Amino acid sequence: MAKFTDTITIQVRAGKGGQGAVSFYREKYIPKGGPDGGDGGRGGDVYLEASNSFYNLSHLFRDRVYHAESGRQGMGANKHGRDGKDYTVKVPPGTEVRDPEDDSQICDLTQDGQRFLIAKGGMGGRGNAFFKTSTHQAPRFAQPGMPGEERRIVLNLKLIADVGLVGLPNAGKSTLLARITNAKPKIADYPFTTLIPNLGVVQRADSTSYRIADIPGIIEGAHRGLGLGLSFLQHIERVRVMLFLLDVTGEDLAYSLKLLRDELATYNGELTGRPCAVLLTKTDLVDEDELRKIIDQFPGETIVPLSAHSGHNIDLLMRTIDALLE
């Protein structure tokens, strides 16, 4: 499997315009015909296109130049050169394109099939036929083709999902994702098993579906890049619903929930205003009395106690997600 890549810098170069031709009409008995040099072809453009065929940026090569074809030179008999072929760089939906010089956003490709012209091809040069005038009937010059645009760009993938699973390391996010979707994330009983984002799809009975993202766990200071830091937080920006996962066997769960929300708020204040629920995971490891005491720590919250291992309350979770999405 290809390595997951969510940020990469590449170069794009549009095609150069073809040179105009210097040519004169020649035929038997017409030794001094007029100029008939054709124009050069236009250089090809470079486009970016979002495609569901890709889920990350690992198919692209860092600092490689992706270039369109140059236009062909003009010819005699007023024949124009062929235009250069365009080139399309395919990226996954959710790819933000930024200028590395000032970090400004160039475009944001969020829909499958969405295209953006990132580098425009150069114009073809005029052939000498274009420059003929009543006072200058035999021009012996033509224009060179114009160079195409060239630029460096940063591609930054931010996953597009309807629901985001947010929690400390080893809170049970991957186990839950595997239980309720078609995803097959790596699962083990130690922190940071999930080193890359995982996406799963939930198919509803009415044939509609929604996507859930399991993101690497947050630690205190994630907004400053600690732990898996910013590589996590950028993938939570686009989700519509937040599910905060708390391991009931952990300590001070109220503080853990506050930590998660504080890290999100510090990174992007809009995130804490999204619809959310608190999922108490691994409830098969505590008795009912202890679980009731834990639930009482979260007045006013939408609480779903569950066990992804045993399947307890998974149906309640699915109904809760549907309500939040609506």
Image: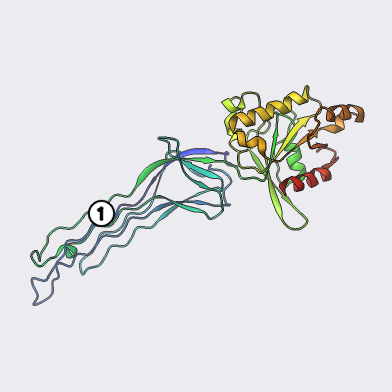
Q: How far from the left and from the top, in percent, is residue 276?
A: 72, 39
Extreme-front residue of the structure: 300
Counting the numbered discs, the total is 1
Where is 294 relative to 160, above or below? above
Q: Is residue 62 left or right of residue 140?
A: right
Q: How far from the left and from the top, in percent, is residue 298?
A: 80, 30
Where is 91 relative to 222, above or below? below
- Report the residue at 61% width, 27% height from top: 222
- Report the residue at 83% width, 44% height from top: 316
Tell which of 147 and 316 is nearer to you.
316
Regarding mark 1 in the picture, which secondary structure is present there?
A: loop
Q: Is residue 267 visible?
A: yes
Q: Is residue 215 visible?
A: no
Mark 1 residue crowding within 10 angstroms, few (<14) / some (14–19) / many (20+): many
Where is 323 relative to 305, above or below? below
Q: Residue under circle 1?
A: 145
- Report the residue at 25% width, 67% height from top: 79
Q: Is residue 167 left or right of residue 50?
A: right
Q: How far from the left and from the top, in percent, is residue 64?
A: 42, 41
Residue 217 sits in quarter: top right
Q: How far from the left and from the top, in percent, is residue 88?
A: 45, 53
Q: Is residue 172 left or right of residue 270?
A: right
Tell which of 36 and 263 is nearer to you.
263
Specify the amino acid type for callout 1: Gly
Tell which of 54 and 212 is nearer to you.
212
Q: Is residue 13 left or right of residue 315?
A: left
Extreme-bottom residue of the structure: 29
Extreme-top residue of the structure: 251
Where is 135 relative to 242, above or below? below
For the N terminus, the image quarter is top right
